[in-house]
Amino acid sequence: MMDDILEEENRQSAEPTSSTFIKIGEVNTISRARALRIVTDDVIIGIDGEIYKDGIIELKALLEECDEDLGVAITIWRAGTIFNVIAYGPLGATLEIASAEDAEAIGKDVSDYRFPKRDELIIFEVLRNLTRKCEIIDTTPSQTASIMPAVWLAQNRLFEPLLAILSIYAITFVVHWALFLVAYVVLGLYFRRGSLMMLRSFIVYKEYQMWMVIAARDIKEVQEVCRRIDPKTQFRNSLVGDPVVEQPPIKKRRRSSIPGM
C-alpha cells in the first residue's frame, strides 16, 4: 500500500503543471532571443538536460550567472515541436507563466523526449531561401579549414574563393617555395578565424536568410526539427526524406446543360 502511495506521489511530481514552464512574451529588437530566432509564444521547458520547474526570477538569475563560454542549453517547445538552443546570457525578452492548456499539450509531447546535456549539443545555423531550400551550417570550428583551406572550400562548394586560393598557391610556389609556405600558413590562420563568417556570407549572397539557430546532437536532428516546423522545408542532402507536396485540387468537369451534349 505504501509503495502504491509513493509511486503515485512520484508520478504527480513528474507531471508538468502550469507553473512549470515559462512562455516567451515580447522579444526585444536587439537581443539574444532574436539572434537565436526565439519567437513569441515559444515555451521554455528544460534547462541543461532537465525539465524546468522553477520560476521566472530563478530563470533570469540562472541566465545572468551562466558560463559565458559554455552557455546554457535551453529546451524550447513551439506548437508541438521540441528543439534546443544555447544562450550565453539573458534572453532579452519578457517572460510569463505558460497557461494550463500549454502545459497539458507540452506534457504529452515531453513524455518520450530525452532532454540533452549541454556537452551533447552542437550549434547549427539554418539559412533558408524563398523556395524553402535550406543550408545548414555546423558552427563547430573546422580543423580542415585551418590545415587544408582548399579542401574545406571544395567540401563547402565555395568555388570562387577556391580558385583564388589555388591561384595564390601556384603564384607563390613559382616565385619561391619559402614564399609558398608563408602564404600557406597565413591563409591557414585566416581560415581558422574567418571560415564560418565566409561560409555564412556566401550562403547569404545566394539569397538565403537566417531562419533557425538550433543546438542538436547531429544534422539529422536539425533536419527533423525544421521539417516538423515547416513540412515543405527542403534540404540539399536530405536525411529525412522528401518534403510534403500539396496535390492541386482536381477540377470537376462541368456537365453541359444542352440535351444530348
Image (tube, rainbow, N blue to C red):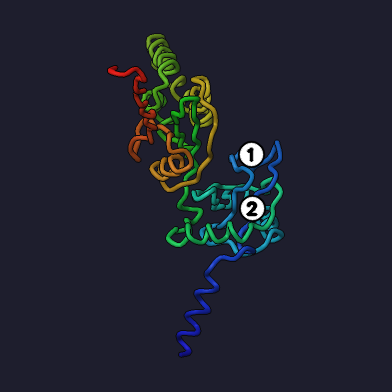
Indicate the position of residue 259 as horizontal and vertical percent values. Answer: 31, 19
Q: In the image, what residue type sits under mark 1?
A: Arg
Indicate the position of residue 251 as horizontal and vertical percent values. Answer: 37, 26
Which badge, 2 or 1, comes first in the chain's sequence?
2
Give the vertical position of 148 relative to 29 (above or below). Answer: above
Q: Which residue is mark 1?
A: 34
Kindly tell me whether residue 158 is visible in this rendering. Answer: yes
Q: Which residue is mark 2?
A: 23
Kindly tell me whether residue 178 is visible in this rendering. Answer: no
**Residue for point 71% across, 40% down:** 28
Label 2 SS = strand
Left or right of 216 on screen, residue 24: right
Quarter of the image where the C terminus is located? top left
Left or right of 127 on screen, residue 88: right
Indicate the position of residue 91 as horizontal and vertical percent values. Answer: 66, 47
Q: In the image, what residue type sits under mark 2?
A: Lys
